[in-house]
Image (cartoon, rainbow, N blue to C red):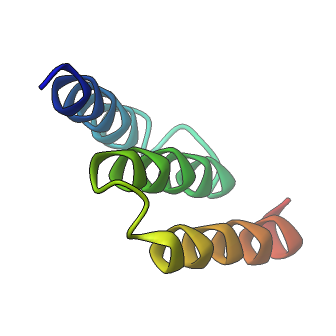
Amino acid sequence: MMQKVRVLVSAFFCLYGLFHFSFSFPLRYFFYCAISLSFSITLYLGGRMFYFMLGCDLLYMVGHLFYG
């Protein structure tokens, strides 16, 4: 139960950061938030979302190449 609460709180702060800083941060920080959210989802589901996390990592790499 505590793990679910911890994951939901981290996802909330990630989404709050996306909303609050959406106009002041460059685009690459959106990829950082996507990575942290994917780790939270992976922890919540017990590692069954490996391909989702891998897709977010690939998005981060592509974003870092073009915008970093």
Give how far across and how far down residue 20 sits, in percent. Answer: 33, 32
Residue 17 in which image quadrant: top left
Q: In the rendered view, tell whether residue 43 sits above or below residue 12.
A: below
Query: How many numbered callouts?
Result: 0
Q: Is 2 left or right of 48, judged from the image as shown?
A: left
Q: Is 36 left or right of 14, judged from the image as shown?
A: right
Q: Is 42 left or right of 67, judged from the image as shown?
A: left
Q: Nearer the viewer, residue 16 or 36?
A: 36
Give how far across and how far down residue 6 sits, in percent. Answer: 27, 23
Give how far across and how far down residue 35 sits, in percent. Answer: 56, 53
Write the residue at 53% across / 53% down: 30
Write the residue at 19% across / 19% down: 2
Write the residue at 38% across / 43% down: 18
Q: In the rendered view, tell whether residue 61 sits above or below residue 32.
A: below
Q: In the rendered view, tell whether residue 57 sits above or below residue 6.
A: below
Write the residue at 23% across / 25% down: 9
Q: Nearer the viewer, residue 47 or 41?
A: 47
Residue 68 in which image quadrant: bottom right
| Quadrant (top left/top right/bottom left/bottom right) for the N terminus | top left
Give how far across and how far down residue 56 sits, in percent. Answer: 56, 70
